[in-house]
Image (spheres, rainbow, N blue to C red):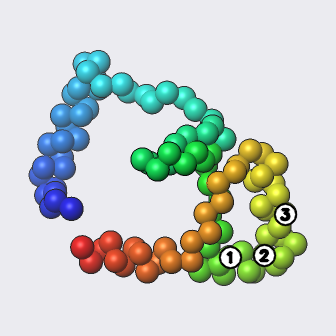
Amino acid sequence: MAHCSRRNFLKAGLAAGVLAGTGGLPVRAARGSATDWVTLGKSGVKVTRLALGTGSISGKVQRDMGQEGFTGLVRYAYDHGVRFFETSELMARCTRCWASR
C-alpha cells in the first residue's frame, strides 16, 4: 500500500470537493436498498448489500445473547431480506496482518 501523507490526503479531498461542486463528479451514488443483490468484488458471487456479521468480539456478543436470542436475530435479518451472513472467526488476526504490511 502506498504511503499517503496528510498533505496529499487533504489535496486529494479538496480536488474531489471542487470536482463534485462543479458537476465533474456525482455528489450522490445511486440510491439502493440494503437488501439489493450486488456482486462481491471480482468474484462474481452475488450477495445482499447488507451482511450480518456473526463474530462480534470473537462471538462474545452473540454467545451472551444465548441460543434463542441469537436465533431470533438471524431469523429477523433473514425475514427482512438479508442473505449474506459473515461467519469469519479470524478478523482480528487478519487486521493485524494488514496493519503489518
Q: Residue at x 57, y 71 (%)?
A: 88
Contact, mark 2 vs mark 3 (Cβ under 8 Å): no
Answer above or below: position of 38 versus 50. Answer: above
Answer above or below: position of 75 versus 71. Answer: above
Cα separation between marks 2 and 1: 7 Å
Q: Nearer the viewer, residue 70 or 87?
A: 87
Element class at badge 3: helix
Left or right: where 45 falls relative to 98: right
> Can you tell which mark lies on residue 65?
2
Cα separation between marks 1 and 3: 14 Å
The residue beneath circle 3 is: 72
Percent position of residue 10, x then y = 18, 46
Cα separation between marks 2 and 3: 10 Å
Left or right: where 19 falls relative to 76: left
Q: Quarter holding the N terminus? A: bottom left
Contact, mark 1 vs mark 3 (Cβ under 8 Å): no
The residue beneath circle 1 is: 61
